[in-house]
Image: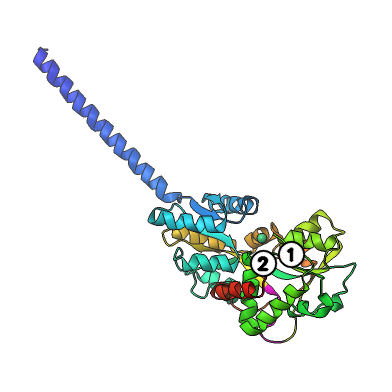
Amino acid sequence: MSTDRLNLCCEYLLVALMLAMLVACSAEKGAEQTAHAMSADPIVVYSSRKEHLIQPVFQQFTEQTGIAVEYTTDKAGVLIERIKTEGKNTPADLLITVDAGNLGYAAAEGIFQTINSDVINDTVAPHLRDQQDLWTGLSLRARTLVYSTERVKPDDLSTYQALGESQWQGRLCLRTSKKVYNQSLVAMLIAEQGEVKTEQTVAAWIANLAIDPTSNDTKVMQAIEAGQCDVGIVNTYYFGRLEAKNPDLPLALFWPNQSVAKNSGVHVNVSGAGILKHSSNSDQARRLLEWLVSEQAQALFAGLNKEYPVISSGAIDPQVSAWGEFKQSPLALSKAYQLQPAAVKLMDRVGYQ
Ligand code: FE
């Protein structure tokens, strides 16, 4: 074979080899794309609910659906700011946070899209969801009365308002008004009975305080235990945590405002979530939300934090159900954010620190 022909032959071989490589390469790429379409992208969650309360729930979702969930936890305000800063480039699909006040703030900042889910609409009571469908409750907590079983008879208690009566002079403990839980409680009192009456109620509470407002709910209960005060207002799950540590806790919960009046009832709030406006995976995020309100997920999601399910058919944790049944306020929790500015100003006016 001449050198020319040998070169030509080599060139043919080289071209053939390159073509083969190209075909193999594009086939591989095609297979990769198919696999990508079949296994969904992970859902990215920003959560102000603590890791130990969400990790086991997401793990179960992934086991059942094959869809991975990645999450970041931080304070609600920090996460909302981060979502706003990231804008269209946010990797997050879902924000989970606590309190209708925070959820309402996130909605007002324009970071959510409508949820648009028949499953959510059919299973979660309307007052535990946003009126504009921008967020939904995922677990329910009550903000209720707690009292010393050594110094108070449950018959002495009746309503939130009655904690302002003279019999509780120097016997009441409250958490700081800076916490969104109390801002939401006062906002919901305004929704229930108007601003004038609520101002009288809160001013009377302040006149009955035994000590300065505490930094958290647990400190309210510790102060009652220590004899500094006899009654207070706390979220049920904080009581649940203390009771789990000490079953002989000399404290009990009381369900106030149980009269037949239409707007009456125990003030409840939620942990909840919304799908982000700039989510690149909103179908899967909706699927996760819908799974979270299933009976099985509700038992875990609510039970892990000693909370109540948001679905009527949900199983209640045995420790929580031992606290007894109560009638909850039927007022829409969207009001907790709408009336928050009025609540904050009102608390400031009466000197509630
Ligand atoms: Fe809390």
Residue 30: where, in percent of width, then height? Answer: 33, 43
Determine if residue 311 is in view.
no
Instruction: Please report the residue visible at 37 percent of the width from the left and 45 percent of the height from the top.
Output: 33
Q: Report crowding for label 1: few under 14, some 14 to 19, many 20 or more residues within 10 A (C-alpha).
A: few
Kindly identify which residue carries mark 1.
212
Residue 308: where, in percent of width, then height? Answer: 69, 66
Which residues are drawn in magenta?
261-267
Residue 317: where, in percent of width, then height? Answer: 74, 62
Query: Is 332 one of the magenta-colored residues?
Result: no
Q: Indicate the quadrant containing the C terminus: top left, top right, bottom left or bottom right.
A: bottom right
Of labels 1 and 2, earlier in sequence is: 1
- What type of secondary structure mainly makes up the magenta span? loop
What numbered label is drawn on residue 162?
none
Q: Which residue is at the front of the view, 85 or 170?
A: 170
Amino acid beneath label 2: Gln
What numbered label is drawn on residue 353?
2
Q: Which residue is at the front of the view, 296 or 157?
A: 157
